[in-house]
Image: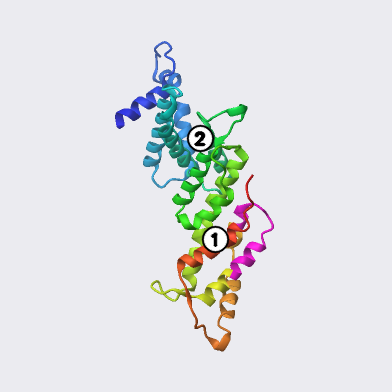
Amino acid sequence: MAEKRRSGVAAILSDSKPAKPDTDEEFLSQLGVGVLLRGALLKLVEARSEDPIGFLADHFSNLASESENGAAGCGDGEKDKATQEQRLARALWHLKLAHHSQRSAFNNNVRIAYELLMQGGPRRGGGGGVRGRIYTEMLRSLCCEGEVSESTAAPLLRRIQCHDHEAVPFELFRQGVLTCVVFSDYVRTSRSLYIVVRPSPEAQAQRALCQAVLGALRDALDTSQCADSARYLEASAKIAPCRLAKAMASAYKPRGGLGGSVMDPKEFEGAAAALFIARVRVLS
């Protein structure tokens, strides 16, 4: 594996072989090592990785893999599946480098992922873009890696996925990616709200309390007039403690207590997710 990485990186650096350099500086300059390392360090700064050695190893491994695939040419027919899986894995790696709140770095990584997935794609009728099937698979993978279950993600994916044969333009691709990563953060926020209302880690929360919290969450989402899905995440994350306390207190009003049925975490998560999904525009 290490030998494969070395050979791949060597292929990146040595497209042409000019005269042998006289000094170390000339040697590094001829091979473009400075540009290669500068690009790697910029990616590291963007990602703010807590494991810089592992991050750089993955970064150069991805570069080596891209170089080897490029050197092998476009390939023939049914070799496509393995190649597409490799490109999808690299695209997902780039998409995880920067959080969506780092808008400039995130958009740059989305562009890189898009171009990776376009490589070798069909050009029927002169149309370009990422294949709809690959796009949908990537959105599904983003939700999975964001710790969103298939059942919770499915209604969102049905709303924003494309037909297998469609060519997905960049702006639609960017919006779909942003929606999925924001949704993943939102689902995690909703889980933290459930933790607030359950009496203990082993117990389930009272339904009346959950409905009160979901009502406060709905009100927070309704205050966001922007169609950008990131604004919905900001709204949900900024539910004022006093508003949440008021909603929970209102659930206690009848006879000074709660009683009644409970709501499990899965049901609460699904209800919270539905509030978000209802506000997502169908991408087209």
Please state, as top left, top right, bottom left or bottom right, where the N terminus lies in the image: top left
Q: Is residue 14 left or right of residue 121?
A: left
* Amino acid on which the number 2 mark rests in the picture: Leu
**Mark 1 surroundings: few (<14), some (14-19) or many (≥20) residues within 10 A:** many
Q: Is residue 154 left or right of residue 283?
A: left
Asked whether residue 240 is in view, the answer is: no
The residue at which mark 1 appears reads as 273
Image vertical order of residue 8 relative to residue 50, above or below? above
Residue 244 drawn in magenta: no
| Residue at x-position 38% and y-position 23% | 10
Looking at the picture, tell me which residue is in the foreground, 98 or 23.
98
- The span picked out in magenta is 215-232
- Marks 2 and 1: in contact by CB < 8 Å? no
Residue 184, percent from left and from top: 51, 54
Judging from the image, what secondary structure is the residue with disc 1 in?
A: helix
Q: Is residue 176 left or right of residue 140?
A: right
Looking at the picture, tell me which residue is in the foreground, 267 or 36.
267
* Number of callouts: 2
Q: Main secondary structure of the magenta part?
A: helix
Whichever of callouts 1 and 2 sits on the residue coming sooner in the sequence is 2
| Residue at x-position 58% and y-position 28% | 124
Image vertical order of residue 44 relative to residue 74, above or below? below
| Residue at x-position 57% and y-position 43% | 162
Looking at the picture, tell me which residue is in the foreground, 206 or 61.
206
Measure how far apart labels 1 and 2 are at the Cα level: 29 Å
* Amino acid on which the number 1 mark rests in the picture: Ala
The residue at which mark 2 appears reads as 117
Residue 226 drawn in magenta: yes
Residue 108, percent from left and from top: 56, 38
Asked whether residue 277 is in view, the answer is: yes
